[in-house]
Amino acid sequence: MERIDVFIKTRDGATVPVYATDHSSGVDLCALVDGPVVLAPMERALVPTGLFIGIPEGYEAEVRPRSGIAVKHGVTVLNTPGTIDSDYRGEVMVILINLGSEAFTINKGDRVAQMVFKRLARVEFRQVPDLTDTVRGEGGFGSTGI
């Protein structure tokens, strides 16, 4: 497994992310809120983490939902996956939405999302008159079955 250095700066009270297990893909992001934040059903909120990170060029961080709060409470990351570019130096924030039927409370230190680091490829688009044929062709949105 490749290892990279990501520099981190924190606000007072922030939780520095760690991998929960040796084989975890992502690190948990914890809320750094002043007091309880209550998300009513269908309400969204921008949740601060108190983290500022320096990602190496050629990588990104993806902010993803945590499966536990998604399945138990219907709370997820609205713009999943949220992308953090290597040149961003602002605070890592998480856009949460409550798709559940009951209010959900976010407290300081709650694990609200996870962050995964990925290598990127820079592409060059080359305009062509036609694309090569494939078996699937233009079929999409369920064309290969359930």
Image (cartoon, rainbow, N blue to C red):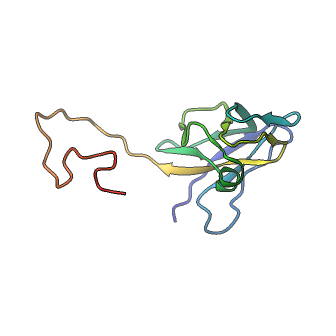
Direction front: furthest residue: 101
Q: Position of residue 117 (x, y in %)?
A: 55, 50
Image point 65% across, 40% down: which residue?
99
Q: Position of residue 134 (x, y in %)?
A: 16, 52
Looking at the picture, tell me which residue is in the foreground, 3 or 64: 64
Say left or right for 44 vs 82. Answer: right
Direction bottom: furthest residue: 22
| Total tally of numbered discs in the picture | 0
Question: Does 46 sit above or below residue 56?
Answer: above
Q: Position of residue 146 (x, y in %)?
A: 37, 57
Asked which quadrant contains residue 25, the reply is: bottom right
Asked which quadrant contains residue 80, the reply is: top right
Image point 62% across, 63% down: which residue?
24
Say left or right for 22 vs 59. Answer: right
Q: Position of residue 32 (x, y in %)?
A: 81, 39
Direction left: furthest residue: 129
Image point 71% across, 36% down: which residue?
41
Question: Does 93 sit above or below residue 113?
Answer: above
Say left or right for 32 vs 2. Answer: right
Asked which quadrant contains residue 145, the reply is: bottom left
